[in-house]
Image (cartoon, rainbow, N blue to C red):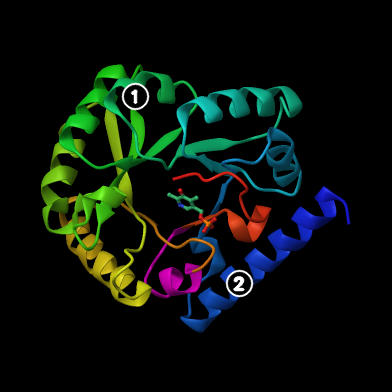
């Protein structure tokens, strides 16, 4: 099997999983975006996934993404693609990330939000990254303080608050974690009705996330295979 056949097969499998998870809870698959996490994989793979119809891609490191997005643009100059930053972001990298990212999904502090706003040359879509168990070493802003950070982001004229993102914590069942996030987002939407994105669920737990309202699953391994390089 060549790489194109391999990726077509895994994409079909992931799409089946999303459809089944939606059907199980009476949701439409149209409500769930598939974000292909292409970190550590080459631009050629992105080109194939683009040929197969995907338009949303995610990276977690600025340098790698800068290179890859440029290579992809050369490989498929006419393809529609949106790039998401899903890795932890240092404030001094904001300007650089904004050169390739269409949305920054990992805003986890007011200081980072301010740095992005300062670097932005046009209104920039962001997600607030939430830590459900409060363990900030894994990234994310404590869930109890989500309203305050969301208010801060929403006050910036340079930032567009699109929703929230989370990585399920280790010491808690994914169901419990995603349920807690959904509850917090439901409350958040009273003040921020446009915060409609819930980015939750990865290769291992996308079904649980979809059962609890995820609108965006971030899938790496199940699409592209296991990563050879460690990529935190
Ligand atoms: C790598 C990564 C993913 C994809 O994880 P898989 O388990 O390979 O699907 C999703 N979200 C973030 C933030 C990641 O860094």
Q: Is residue 196 above or below residue 88?
A: below
Please give the residue where the numbered disc 1 appears in the rendered image: 94
Q: Quadrant of residue 13?
A: bottom right
Start-end of magenta stretch: 205-216
Which residue sits at x=61%, y=50%? 227
Kindly state the secondary structure of the residue where label 2 is placed.
helix
Q: Is residue 76 above or below residue 146?
A: above
Q: In this view, does 179 lie above or below 225?
A: below
Which residue sits at x=36%, y=57%? 167
| Image position, residue 205 (x, y; %) | 47, 69
| Nearer to me, 66 or 209 | 66
User: Is residue 214 magenta-colored?
Assistant: yes
User: Is residue 137 magenta-colored?
Assistant: no
Report how far apart the C-alphas of labels 2 and 1 lie in the structure.
35 Å
| Image position, residue 211 (x, y; %) | 42, 75
Q: Which of marks 2 and 1 is in front?
A: 1
Please give the residue where the numbered disc 2 appears in the rendered image: 17
Quadrant holding the C terminus: top left
- The 10 Å Cα crowd at callout 1, few under 14, some 14 to 19, many 20 or more, is many
Kindly state the secondary structure of the residue where label 1 is placed.
helix
- In this picture, residue 34 sits left or right of residue 98: right
- In this picture, residue 197 sits left or right of residue 205: left
- Marked residue nearer the N-terminal end (2 or 1): 2
């Amino acid at each position: 099997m060549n790489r194109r056949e391999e990726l077509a097969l895994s994409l079909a499998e992931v799409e089946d999983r999303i459809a089944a998870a939606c059907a199980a809870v009476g949701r439409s698959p149209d409500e769930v975006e598939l974000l292909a996490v292409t970190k550590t994989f080459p631009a050629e793979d992105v080109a194939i996934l683009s040929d197969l119809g995907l338009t949303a891609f995610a990276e977690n490191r600025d340098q790698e993404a800068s290179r890859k997005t440029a290579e992809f643009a050369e490989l498929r100059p006419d393809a529609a693609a949106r790039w998401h930053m899903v890795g932890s972001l240092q404030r001094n990298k904001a300007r650089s990330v904004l050169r390739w990212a269409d949305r920054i999904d990992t805003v986890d502090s007011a200081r980072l939000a301010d740095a992005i706003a300062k670097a932005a040359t046009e209104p920039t879509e962001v997600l607030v990254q939430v830590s459900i168990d409060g363990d900030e070493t894994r990234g994310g802003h404590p869930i109890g303080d989500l309203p305050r950070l969301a208010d801060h982001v929403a006050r910036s004229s340079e930032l567009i608050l699109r929703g929230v993102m989370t990585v399920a914590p280790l010491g808690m069942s994914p169901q419990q974690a995603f349920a807690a996030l959904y509850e917090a987002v439901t409350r958040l939407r009273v003040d921020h009705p446009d915060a409609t994105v819930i980015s939750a669920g990865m290769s291992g737990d996308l079904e649980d996330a979809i059962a609890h309202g995820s609108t965006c699953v971030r899938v790496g391994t199940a699409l592209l295979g296991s990563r050879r390089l460690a990529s935190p």
